[in-house]
Amino acid sequence: MEDLQSHQDERGVPLDEVGVSGLRYPIRVWDQARERQATVATFEMSVALPQEFKGTHMSRFIEVLEARRGEISLGTLPQLVEELATRLSAPSARVLVKFPYFLERAAPVSGAVALMDYECAFEGRVVTGELGKVADFTLEVTVPVTSLCPCSKAISDYGAHNQRSALSMRVQSVDLSPASMIWIEELVALAERSASAPVYPLLKRADERHVTMQAYDNPVFVEDMVRNVAVQLKEDPRVAWFEVRADNHESIHNHAAFARTSWRREPSG
């Protein structure tokens, strides 16, 4: 059959990305206990298309993914991205994998246990240019937390406004060796230490009392949460780059508040 995608295109316009999105696929993710967790991911896979080609071969994206049979991690993602670029003869390729990740959480007083989900993502890129091949691989974790306003606490006779917040961390390791691996569980714990209090899937009355008072004793602005996370990530020798964003879903305002920062480790020597 005729291969229309390989025909010459005369318009002289290269495309930065072309590919498939919204592709749902079952995957298995390694957790910090070295066990595999089954989940369902949404994939976005793309390659750059040089100006001389009319189109890309969309079916090959699925074939490359199917060959991996759902074994996806920051350790296996580089091979997937490389294979995508090679299979489609592309100068660059990108794979974004978004998935819910579940952790068993115990309430702070009663010990009641339930599963809690966290929105996570792996993203891998590879670009081949005049200076050779450049690749980066990113872990993203979004953690729901509680924040209590320091200003509200300071000016109120009793109580203070608080809200659920989201702390999102995008992190790149110095390399992909097992020793440099950054785990989802570690970022969840880091985010919770940086907020007023954690969010739990199941709380009894004694737990609600504990969490409410914990938040009151640890007031933070949205700026504080981002800085708290940033300081800890900078101190971690495994971290090469990060971006942190906090979003407060304000309880007494008709708007949200946010803060964001990024940082890259300078090469040593």
Image (spheres, grey):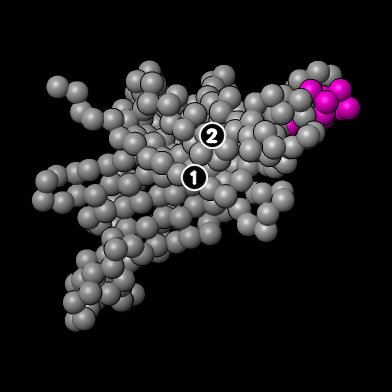
Task: Tell me the number on the disc at residue 225.
Answer: 2
Q: CA distance from mark 1 to mark 2?
A: 9 Å
The residue at the point 78 percent across, 34 percent down is 157
Q: Tell me the quarter of the picture where residue 172 sits.
A: top left
Residue at the left extreme, as displayed: 130
Which residue range is magenta in the image?
200-211
Q: Can you give x and y, in whole percent of width and height, for residue 6 in the image? A: 26, 71
Position above or below: 85 against 221: below
Residue 228 among those drawn in magenta: no
- Say which of 118 and 176 sits in front: 118
Residue 118 coordinates in the image, percent (x, y):
62, 38
Q: Is residue 136 left or right of residue 75?
A: left
Choose the circle earlier in sequence order: 1 or 2: 2
Residue 52: image quadrant is bottom left
| 139 versus 231 height, above or below | below
Q: Identity of the amino acid at label 1?
A: Ala
Figure quadrant of residue 134: top left
The quarter of the rendered structure image containing the C terminus is top left
Residue under the image location 34 percent in, 36 percent down: 263
C-beta proximity under 8 Å, tags 1 and 2? yes
How many tags in the picture?
A: 2
Q: Is residue 152 left or right of residue 236?
A: right
Residue on which disc 1 sits? 259
- Given the image, on which type of amino acid does mark 2 rest? Met
Residue 199 lies left or right of residue 37; in this view the side is right
Determine crowd level at label 1: few under 14, some 14-19, many 20+ residues with C-alpha closer than 10 A.
some
Question: Which residue is the extreme one toward the right?
Answer: 205
Percent across and percent down for residue 162 are 71, 40
